Image: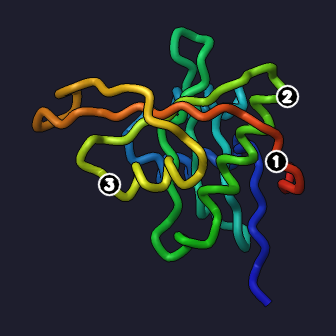
Amino acid sequence: MTDPIKIRFAHPADLDGCLTLDHASVPAEIVKLKITAREIVVAEKAGQLVGYLRLEYLWSLVPYIALIWVVADQRRQGIGKALLHYLENALLDGGHAALYSSSQADETEPQAWHRHVGFRECGIIAGINEGGVGEIFFRKELSCHLGQEGG
């Protein structure tokens, strides 16, 4: 029997694990604030964090996935999708109707994942990333997903 995956908002005790999974080098103080604000969702398996989603708000209003990450040996098991669905339900409860995300223009696999989970391309910022690579933006209309584990 495999260990179940628990999807939940991060707790203060998760700080070190969150910092390890957040590859954007966000300062610890910012991650602490985001944990308190319930802007980080984690996937836990056998007491270890195996997935991470960091939420931002554009203009302090529009929910945007800044980072979603699943550890390499846990990928393709639905963890990223479960993190997303958990967040979607929380955003719906908070009165939001849409969620945004993005991917570098040269990252075909993350773009395919966004489309697979219901995001639609809605724009691009040319040359914003290192090496002049553009960023493709996605929008997803939110709808309720039943049966998600809480925490």
Figure quadrant of residue 6: bottom right
Q: Which residue is mark 2?
A: 93
Front one among 45 and 132: 132
Instruction: Pick the quarter of the image with the N terminus.
Output: bottom right
Q: Which residue is mark 3?
A: 108
Give the foreground label among 2 and 3.
3
- Disc 3 residue type? Thr
Residue drawn at (60%, 32%) of the image = 32
In the rendered structure, find residue 145 and report the number of the disc placed on it.
1
Crowd tier of the residue under label 3, counting other residues whose Cα lies within 10 Å: few below 14, some 14–19, many 20 or above? few
User: Marks 2 and 1, how far apart in space?
Assistant: 12 Å
Query: Which secondary structure lies at badge 3?
Result: helix
Give the foreground label among 2 and 1.
1
Residue 28 visible in the displayed image? no
User: Marks 1 and 3, how far apart in space?
Assistant: 26 Å
Marked residue nearer the N-terminal end (2 or 3): 2
Query: Which secondary structure lies at badge 1?
Result: loop
Residue drawn at (59%, 51%) of the image = 117
Crowd tier of the residue under label 2, counting other residues whose Cα lies within 10 Å: few below 14, some 14–19, many 20 or above? few
Q: Residue furthest left?
A: 131
Residue 98 image offset from top left, x and y in percent: 65, 26
Question: Is residue 129 depicted above or below 22 in this figure?
Answer: above
